[in-house]
Image (tube, rainbow, N blue to C red):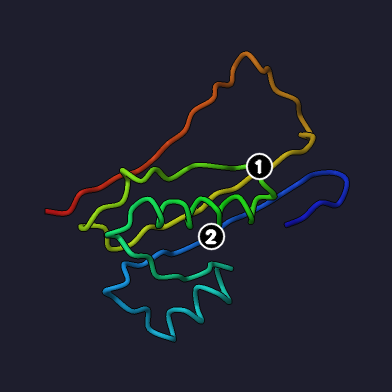
Amino acid sequence: MNTNGNYELYIANGLFLNKNYEFKSSFINIANNYFLAETKNIDVTNSFGSSEMINNFISQNTNGLINNIISSSDINENTVLVIVNAIYFYGKWATKFNKGDTKLEISIFRKQIL
């Protein structure tokens, strides 16, 4: 988090692994120290609880400014890893841009491995 008066920046980086797998300790250290990412295990058989835990993580790390990114339908028994990178930025730009040239868009990448 950075709120120096000129801008606000909140970042939520997280790796949520199916509880049937384990992160290696060396991987956890790299994720934490280099990417400021938290690592947690989730119970994919409880998709509602897992999505709620991930959404709470995102909300807490973005000062409540980003909420409800993951739906319970996004998690199922085939889910191995959920990678989260949520960024909230608010500030003044050095060069202003035309608001009419912008649009609200949410991108969610889903890949099914067969």
Write the residue at 41% across / 56% down: 49
Residue designated by label 1: 65
* Residue 9 image offset from top left, x and y in percent: 71, 49
Q: Amino acid at mark 2?
A: Asn
- Give left or right: position of 49 versus 85: left
Element carrying mark 1: loop
Around disc 1, counting alpha carbons within 10 Å, would you say few (fewer than 14), some (14 to 19), or many (20 or more)? few
- In the rendered image, residue 41, in percent from the top left (x then y), is placed at 39, 70
Residue placed at 54% from the left, 25% from the top?
104
Q: Is residue 68 above or below residue 57?
A: above
Residue under label 2, please give it. 13
Query: In the picture shown, does residue 21 fall above or below 17?
Result: below
x, y (%) of residue 103? 55, 21
In terms of image quadrants, where is residue 89? top right
Residue type, numbered disc 1:
Leu
Residue 43, placed above or below residue 58: below
Mark 2 closeness class: few <14, some 14–19, many ≥20 residues within 10 Å: some
- Which residue is found at the position 51% from the left and 53% from the top? 85
Query: Is residue 56 left or right of 7 when viewed as pictured?
Result: left
Q: Quadrant of residue 26?
A: bottom left
